[in-house]
Image (cartoon, coloured by chain):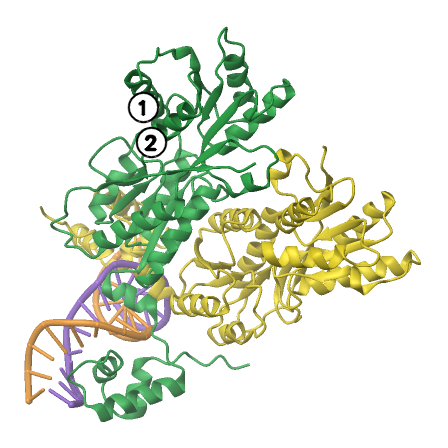
Chain colours: A green, B yellow, C purple, D orange
Amino acid sequence: MISKKLPTIKEIAKQLGISVSTVSRALHDHPSIGLRTKTRVRQLAEELGYEPNQTAIFFKQRKTFTIGVILPYLIEDFFAGAISGIEKVANDHKYNVLIGQSNDDVEREKAIITAMKNQRVDGIIVSLSKHTKNLDHFRALEKYQIPIVFFDRVPASNDFNKVAFDMPHGTHQAITYLMGKGHRRIGIINGPKEMKSSKERTDTYMEVMQKKRLKIDLSLVAYCDLTKEGTAEAMETLITLKQPPTAILAINDYVALDAIQYCKSKKLKNNKDIFFVSYANLPITNYLESPPMASIEQFPEKQGTAAAEILMDLINSDKENQPAPRNILIQGELVEHKR
Amino acid sequence: MISKKLPTIKEIAKQLGISVSTVSRALHDHPSIGLRTKTRVRQLAEELGYEPNQTAIFFKQRKTFTIGVILPYLIEDFFAGAISGIEKVANDHKYNVLIGQSNDDVEREKAIITAMKNQRVDGIIVSLSKHTKNLDHFRALEKYQIPIVFFDRVPASNDFNKVAFDMPHGTHQAITYLMGKGHRRIGIINGPKEMKSSKERTDTYMEVMQKKRLKIDLSLVAYCDLTKEGTAEAMETLITLKQPPTAILAINDYVALDAIQYCKSKKLKNNKDIFFVSYANLPITNYLESPPMASIEQFPEKQGTAAAEILMDLINSDKENQPAPRNILIQGELVEHKR
DNA sequence: CTGTTAGCGCATTCAT
DNA sequence: ATGAATGCGCTAACAG
């Protein structure tokens, strides 16, 4: 079994009795190469099944045409959708996508950053692990001229490029919608207090209530750790209030589903005794007997696309003269679920 | 704004007044380098923040320490889970993971293969697009010495390495389970006929029926294209049979859900008038009012892990003397859904 | 229009 | 124990 060496431009040059640079230029359709030569070169290249060795090109060009994507969990629909958007943009620009899951572990996140940096990816897209406080490992990338764009779980700092869901807008929609349905006591189930989105949601909630001249009752705002048990606890708190909410805004569909399940165990009928609106708009809600009344679609693919486009811009822009960091907000859309 | 060049071994060598080869060896803990030199080199490397340029190493070593993963849709839980298994193994071996979604499009699959081949990935893990018939684009990789391992959606041919769900075992479990529940007329909704799993499922089905001395009725075997509409058509065919099935084995949970929804529109109650067993065991079934009666867990992560381990073996084995292709079967586990 | 040459950063073979 | 030299495949600056 002979393992023939892969053809190189050198080989082509030799066979044609011309120089490697001519071959290289012919292959790149350089204007100064004669049509005849071009044709000969291309034909032989075709015959030999020549394929440029990208590793040599990467090395030479100091570019890998690869972007890295770091996110917590690929298995979450949101992130899988975001990746698709990223991949699409990347491919349109002839870029490849390297992935790394942090599993919400900061150390893992750092390790991935290091690996990608060594790999010389041309840029990185990140959705932060939920425990990441310190951003030094990202700042360190500046030295390597590797641009970063954050999405979804973005840092608070404004000196980073980021793309995120427009929480005030989405929450405003949700609450207005619930009020339109006659609800006046609206409960909230947030994620952990540390999450930026929890604060944003609460703030918007209060703003809207205030604008409508409604009394703000902070006992209606609960927090949970996103687990089934945590959700149950939060619900317990809410429904045992002296004046329990008639509707609840939940951080995401998963939590809403757990909450609905908890209600069921307490003989509270969803969409009758109590109503839910949540974020994400998971496709599975279509299969549910009793889904949340509505869900705010967050357009994961759009977020991925936006992040990737910014990154491609950064990669192709003047490294020495970077524009101010961009901060894109993606507006959600309230989707009512038919029952 | 000065963009300092990244330090190289050359730089270290110069500053220390020694040769690059010594530096290289020191950094690699080569036995013939003096402890003193080693220490000096390492210290300066540390100080300078030296990081080897992987692109140079890739080029030089003719290895990229990167594996490519091609699969239909990342958004399907099964594939997301498989990727996690793959990533884990890859990282343990210091490998990176490049992804490409075929979106079940053969042309896209070919394009990804080409890109990965040019990128000189060290190996590729593939789950076939549902329409892939011709395997030439995979066979072409042999020439480049790029090993391939297929998983889940694997080709029929035995000259490829593959890891797949043990369909006979799983289907046997499913059918036996349904029979234990008293069902004698069991319908099947397969995927497209091109998919190997369709044939396997049908074959096992027939085998079991035969063993139980039950009449085999091939009109009970339907095929669908995995879309909602295709599923509805398949169901239509099955329930309008003169003797319709009392239970149905569906290729996966998604299809089962669509089928159940279709039944509902026809006033056929799931888990009463008709029963379903499917493959995958998606977590969402826990939230359904009326889930499939049972589902066969396919252990996606385990499949990913197995595939990646085989690939790492292949990558690290003698290219000229490859072992016979391996064919691993992962056994499923039937999970009953409580209602 | 085409050829010659240098060099990217590193590992490695061959000297010493 | 260390250094010098080579080359991986390609692009591009420079030279005709």
- Badge 2: residue crowd in 10 Å (few <14, some 14–19, many ≥20): many
Q: Mark number for residue B257?
A: none
Front residue of A247/A69: it is A247
Name the residue rendered at 83%, 59% in the picture.
Answer: B242
Q: Residue type at mark 2? A: Met
Q: CB atoms at circles 1 and 2 under 8 Å apart?
A: yes
Q: Position of residue B4 (x, y in %)?
A: 14, 49
Q: Mark number for residue A204?
A: 1
| Residue A180, picture quadrant | top left
Count of marks overlaid on the render? 2
Name the residue rendered at 62%, 63% in the picture.
Answer: B154
Residue A209 position (above or below residue B259): above
Q: What element carries label 2?
A: helix
Name the residue rendered at 55%, 46% in the picture.
Answer: B77
Residue pointed to by mark 2: A167
- Badge 1: residue crowd in 10 Å (few <14, some 14–19, many ≥20): some
Q: Position of residue B67 (x, y in %)?
A: 46, 59
Outermost residue on the right side: it is B213
Q: Mark 2 lies on which chain?
A: A
Q: Is residue B38 visible?
A: yes
Q: Residue type at mark 1? A: Thr
